[in-house]
Amino acid sequence: SLEAVQRDAKGTRCVAVTAHGSELCTGHLDGRLSVRNVELLQSTIFEPKRSHEKPLNCIDCAPAGSSYPEIVTGAKDGLIKLWDMRQHDRPCASFAHSFNNGRADVWAVRFLSEHVVAGGYADGSVCLVDLRRGEAAYTTVLESSRGVCSIDCIPARASASAAPS
């Protein structure tokens, strides 16, 4: 019902829309991930039973042209999880950040490509995860950071410029 959607919205912490624009993905304070069709908001089409143990902080959807219906989430439990909407009760993969002797809250996640996900953490670290290998490809700590709350990627230019002769 629409009332259920409105009740759900009170505990919503983060929102993303799939690349084709037909699904609304929401992360909740109780650790839940929900996906709804934007035209039929009353019906949930994907909601794993135990998404995260602690509040979901961030969410992103696979880029346009991706061959998989994937969602990436990050939470206060320190985990980045990759979800395929065809697998209803468990993530495809889960990555724990153990840099700096412990788990830091995940504050930001972003698909950089179909095969690479970036995570930003409360301790100022950034981790790039190679989804094909299932492991961290690069990790660094931003020394002057008080936490990474957003990640963006500037794509390489598709065209080259030529100098005038």
Image (cartoon, rainbow, N blue to C red):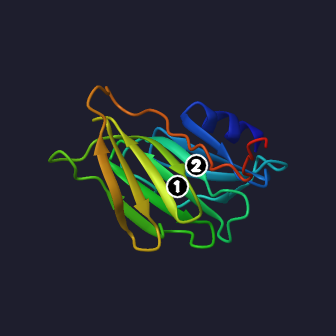
Dividing the image into 4 quarters, which one contains the C terminus? top right
Where does residue 46 sit, x and y in percent of width and height? 63, 60
- What amino acid type should be assigned to the residue bearing mark 2? Asp
Q: Residue furthest right?
A: 39
Viewer-closest of 89 and 79 = 79
Residue identified by numbered label 2: 60
- Say whether disc 1 or disc 2 marks the residue closer to the N-terminus: 2
Q: Which mark is residue 72?
A: 1
- Say which residue appears at 47% left-offset and 73% top-offset: 132
- Say which residue appears at 79% left-offset and 53% top-offset: 22
Q: Which mark is residue 30?
A: none
Q: Is residue 69 left or right of residue 53?
A: right
Q: Image quarter for residue 20?
A: bottom right
- What amino acid type should be assigned to the residue bearing mark 1? Val
Viewer-closest of 102 and 51 = 102
Where does residue 28 sit, x and y in percent of width and height? 52, 41
Where does residue 147 sit, x and y in percent of width and height? 34, 31
Marks 1 & 2, CB-CB < 8 Å contact? yes
In the rendered image, is residue 130 in sight? yes
- Say which residue appears at 41% left-offset and 60% top-offset: 129
Q: Residues within 10 Å of mark 2 (few under 14, many from 20)?
A: many
Where does residue 62 sit, x and y in percent of width and height? 63, 58
Q: Is residue 145 left or right of residue 100?
A: right
